[in-house]
Image: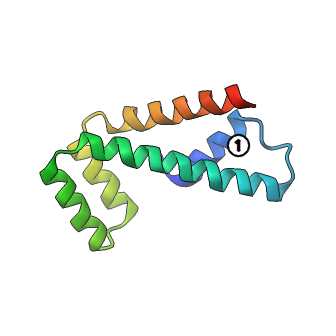
Amino acid sequence: MNQDQIQKTLMEELGLADLPQDKQEQLLVKMTEVLLKRIFVETMDKLNEQARDEYEKLIDQESTPDQVETFLKTNIPTYESLVQKIIDDFKTEMKSNL
C-alpha cells in the first residue's frame, strides 16, 4: 500500500472529508508520518541483521519505492499483512480519539 492509498483510506474511514482542505492536509501529513514510522520500526524488527544491511544499501542506492517494497516482501513473508495490521491498529486508535 503506497502513501496515497494510506492517506485516502485514512480520509474515508476517519471521516475527515468534512474538514476544511488545509486542516485535512495538516492532519494527513501528521498521521502519515506517524504511520510510516510505525511501519518502518515494525519492518526493521522483522528483518535479520543481514537483511537490514541489504535494506540500507538499497536506500543508499536511492532505489525506487517499488524496489524497496519488493525487497521487504521477499524478506518478510507476512509483510503485506503486517502493514495492514499496523494501519488497522492506527485507524482504531484514531477513531477512539475522535
Q: Between residues 86 and 5, which one lies in front from this camera angle?
A: 86
Q: Position of residue 86 (x, y in %)?
A: 47, 35
Residue at x 30%, y 67% (from the top left corner): 59
Q: Position of residue 18 (x, y in %)?
A: 86, 43
Lateral position of residue 87 relative to residue 43, left or right: right
Tag 1's secondary structure?
helix
Q: How is the image coloured?
A: rainbow
Q: Position of residue 57 (x, y in %)?
A: 22, 67
Residue at x 73%, y 57% (from the top left corner): 25
Lateral position of residue 90 relative to residue 54, left or right: right
In which quadrant of the rendered view does residue 48 lie?
top left
User: Going by the picture, which residue comes out furthest to the bottom?
Assistant: 61
Q: On the image, numbered disc 1 is attached to which residue?
A: 11
User: The C terminus lies in which quarter of the figure?
Assistant: top right
User: Going by the picture, which residue comes out furthest to the front?
Assistant: 97
Residue at x 71%, y 30% (from the top left corner): 97
Q: Position of residue 22 (x, y in %)?
A: 81, 59
Residue at x 77%, y 36% (from the top left corner): 15
Lateral position of residue 22 relative to residue 55, left or right: right
- Amino acid type at circle 1 is Met
Q: Between residues 55 and 8, which one lies in front from this camera angle?
A: 55
